[in-house]
């Protein structure tokens, strides 16, 4: 990525466009399939595009996060008291009336009217969702890792406020963002919005940058079909090489490791500053800027590589990795595993395959892709972490020499092809009534094929069957 002040790259789906230089303090974010700052991923046809940087000078009047946190604090206390007494949990509408509408009428909370009511109501909605997920996790009705209760936001942490369509925000003809009770804000657009946005979220990260994240609805863009046998690929993710594909390897960028020495110096500078001083806050922002740059580089790298894979491959087969387990095992490889961001890579790749009409298959995480010989199928390869240093090996059964990563990619590709064939076979069985799996062409009709039955009974049906002849 370019240095601050030398210009910013904006990644799009089809090309990379050079933009005009921007201020060093506000580097433009990278356009994403999902919002790079908020982390929201597409849901159905909705995509959260963090597509613009907001000028910081115009956002000094954004005081909503503090008021939003106070409202959420009172809401959280009412939820907790109702749960402790065994009462029914209050709804977001009831809490909105108590902690927003009625509170504005008092002299102690009259300042809540200085911001849009939609911002405060959205904080209640978020808290209601968080508590619903927490109780669903406790009851066992929610899948995935266990969820803890909501925690109060820190004032020094990442801040965000969301305006829905009810807030009547708009984009002016001059390209500014008009927010209720805030005014017009100058925006540096990274690209045009593909459709009318339904909501906007103003985000301030720890490094002091402001972003505007828009939720828009986009249509799928299928790419021209390629020959599956020639272009499908397995993906073996790892640490020494970021990913091994069919015919090429992606080197590990190690963005965090490269910045680790500079980060260490910046953290030592923070520890020398007096707590609560302006110098300490400035030193903390310097640490946050290093982390933000590493995150931006990693995100841009993943976007470029996943886009290239989707364009060059008709089918993609990847491992279903347990990244959390890989990072927490004995605590030795945690930093390197998180630096790779393998989970984000797989999620973005899967979303792009679905959008562009590519086949994506996840191979079971217990599949022995490394130990399995891709030629004879015997489990003679290196096993476990104690043999992780073995990068090449020879099969004891057939004598074939293998590169560890290339052999794993070949096994993942073979397993992915088998799973994809099973998926197609299952789809054909579900459509056995005669309907086509793919949309019918104009003038094409579906005919229901009745199975023939043969009865070994004199004079019965099925006389042409060998058992009924003569």
Image (spheres, rainbow, N blue to C red):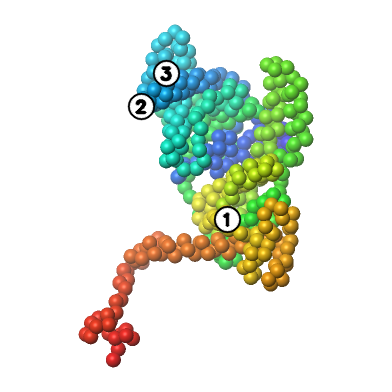
From the image, tell me which residue sits under label 1.
Answer: 366
Dot in front, 2 or 3: 2
Horizontally, residue 210 falls left or right of residue 172, namely right
Residue found farthest to the top: 107
The image shows residue 95 at horizontal and vertical percentages of 39, 22
From the image, tell me which residue sits under label 3.
Answer: 99
**Pointer 2 local density, CA inside 10 Å: few below 14, some 14–19, many at least 20:** few
Horizontally, residue 67 falls left or right of residue 91, namely right
CA separation in Å, label 1 and label 2: 43 Å
- Determine whether 432 is above or below 303 in the image: below
From the image, tell me which residue sits under label 2.
Answer: 88
Please tell me which residue lies in front, 184 or 11.
Answer: 11
- Determine whether 71 is above or below 135 in the image: above
The residue shown at (45%, 45%) is 44
- Determine whether 90 is above or below 19 in the image: above
Disc on res. 416: none
CA separation in Å, label 2 and label 3: 18 Å
Please tell me which residue lies in front, 238 or 145.
Answer: 145
**Pointer 3 local density, CA inside 10 Å: few below 14, some 14–19, many at least 20:** many
Q: Earlier in the sequence, mark 1 or mark 2?
A: 2
Q: Earlier in the sequence, mark 1 or mark 3?
A: 3
The image shows residue 259 at horizontal and vertical percentages of 74, 37
Q: Is residue 154 visible?
A: yes
| Number of numbered tags placed on the structure image | 3
The image shows residue 443 at horizontal and vertical percentages of 35, 66
């Amino acid at each position: 990525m370019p240095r601050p002040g030398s210009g910013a790259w904006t990644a799009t789906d089809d090309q990379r466009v050079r933009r005009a230089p921007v201020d060093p303090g506000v580097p433009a974010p990278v356009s994403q399939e999902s919002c790079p700052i908020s982390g929201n991923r597409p849901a159905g046809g909705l995509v959260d595009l963090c597509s613009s940087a907001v000028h910081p000078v115009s956002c000094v009047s954004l005081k909503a996060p503090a008021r939003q946190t106070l409202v959420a604090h009172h809401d959280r206390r009412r939820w907790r008291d109702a749960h402790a007494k065994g009462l029914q949990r209050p709804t977001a509408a009831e809490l909105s009336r108590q902690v927003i509408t009625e509170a504005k009428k008092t002299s102690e909370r009259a300042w809540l009217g200085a911001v849009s009511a939609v911002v405060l109501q959205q904080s209640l909605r978020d808290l209601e969702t968080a508590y619903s997920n927490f109780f669903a996790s406790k009851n066992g009705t929610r899948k995935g890792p266990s969820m803890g209760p909501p925690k109060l936001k820190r004032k020094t942490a990442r801040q965000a406020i969301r305006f829905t369509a009810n807030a009547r925000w708009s984009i002016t003809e001059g390209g500014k963002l008009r927010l209720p009770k805030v005014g017009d804000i100058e925006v540096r657009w990274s690209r045009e919005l593909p459709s009318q946005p339904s909501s906007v979220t103003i985000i301030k990260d720890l490094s002091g940058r402001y972003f505007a994240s828009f939720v828009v609805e986009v249509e799928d863009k299928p790419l021209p079909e390629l020959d599956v046998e020639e272009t499908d690929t397995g993906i073996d993710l790892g640490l020494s090489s970021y990913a091994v594909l069919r015919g090429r390897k992606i080197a590990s960028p190690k963005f965090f490791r490269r910045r680790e020495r500079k980060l260490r110096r910046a953290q030592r500078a923070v520890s020398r500053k007096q707590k609560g001083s302006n110098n300490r806050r400035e030193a903390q922002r310097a640490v946050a800027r290093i982390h933000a740059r590493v995150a931006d580089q990693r995100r841009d790298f993943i976007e470029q590589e996943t886009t290239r894979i989707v364009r060059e491959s008709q089918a993609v087969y990847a491992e279903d990795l347990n990244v959390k387990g890989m990072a927490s095992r004995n605590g030795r490889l945690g930093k390197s595993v998180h630096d790779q961001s393998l989970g984000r890579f797989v999620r973005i790749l899967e979303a792009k395959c679905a959008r562009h009409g590519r086949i994506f298959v996840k191979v079971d995480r217990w599949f022995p892709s490394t130990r399995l010989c891709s030629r004879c199928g015997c489990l003679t390869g290196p096993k476990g972490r104690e043999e992780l240093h073995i990068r090449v090996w020879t099969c004891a059964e057939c004598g074939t020499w293998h590169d560890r990563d290339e052999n794993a990619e070949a096994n993942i590709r073979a397993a992915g092809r088998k799973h994809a064939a099973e998926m197609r076979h299952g789809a054909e069985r579900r459509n056995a009534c005669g309907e086509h799996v793919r949309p019918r062409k104009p003038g094409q009709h579906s005919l229901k094929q009745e199975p023939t039955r043969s009865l070994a009974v004199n004079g019965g049906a099925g006389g042409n069957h060998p058992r009924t002849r003569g």
